[in-house]
Image (cartoon, grey):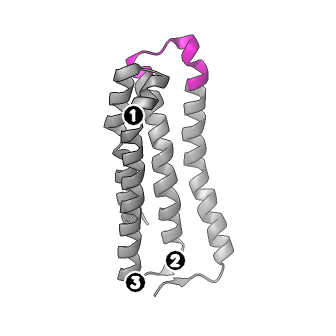
């Protein structure tokens, strides 16, 4: 079984503190680019960066908290790791499928059909991030 460390609240705070910087960094750059997009007149690269920023935020929301939560557990048995991996696989697959199915709607926001194709090509990132969370922990 999994045994939590003596300070579970401290471990949770540390996990939240560790997960917060990547989320803030991705969110800041996505917001900055969206604010500058009308001025810059983004083309293919700009549409790709916007799509990558949005998908990277979703990937960080899936992988970072799970990785830090697993790292905070003092002793982990194989069943816990297997359960965590299976759960993260499902969550990552759902996030990836959501981006894939919403690609046309996201493409209408900017980039048209080319933007939708870029979102579809990047939609696998949440699944890959989720698969890497358990080994990272």
Q: Secondary structure at mark 1?
A: helix
**Tag 3 or tag 1, which sits nearer the N-term?**
3
Of marks 2 and 1, the one in the foreground? 1
**Disc 2 packing (10 Å; few <14; some 14–19; many ≥20):** some
* Residue for point 51% across, 43% down: 57
**Disc 3 packing (10 Å; few <14; some 14–19; many ≥20):** few
Residue at mark 1 to residue at mark 3: CA–CA distance = 39 Å
Q: Relative to 11, is 43 above or below?
A: above
Measured as percent of width and height from the top left, residue 39 is found at 58, 11
Residue at numbered disc 3: 77
* Residue for point 47% across, 21% down: 110
Does 11 sit left or right of 98 as displayed? right
Measured as percent of width and height from the top left, residue 122 is found at 35, 38
Q: Does any portion of residue 63 appear in the rendered image?
A: yes
Residue at numbered disc 1: 103
Q: Relative to 29, is 56 above or below?
A: below
């Amino acid at each position: 079984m999994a045994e939590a460390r003596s300070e579970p609240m401290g471990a949770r705070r540390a996990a939240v503190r560790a997960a917060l910087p990547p989320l803030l960094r991705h969110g800041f750059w996505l917001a900055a680019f969206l604010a500058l997009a009308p001025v810059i007149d983004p083309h293919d690269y700009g549409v790709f960066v916007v799509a990558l920023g949005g998908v990277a935020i979703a990937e960080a929301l899936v992988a970072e908290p799970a990785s830090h939560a697993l790292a905070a557990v003092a002793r982990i048995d194989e069943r816990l790791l297997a359960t965590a991996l299976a759960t993260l696989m499902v969550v990552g697959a759902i996030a990836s499928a959501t981006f894939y199915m919403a690609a046309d709607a996201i493409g209408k926001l900017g980039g048209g059909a080319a933007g939708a194709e870029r979102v579809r090509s990047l939609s696998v990132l949440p699944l890959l991030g989720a698969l890497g969370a358990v080994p990272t922990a």
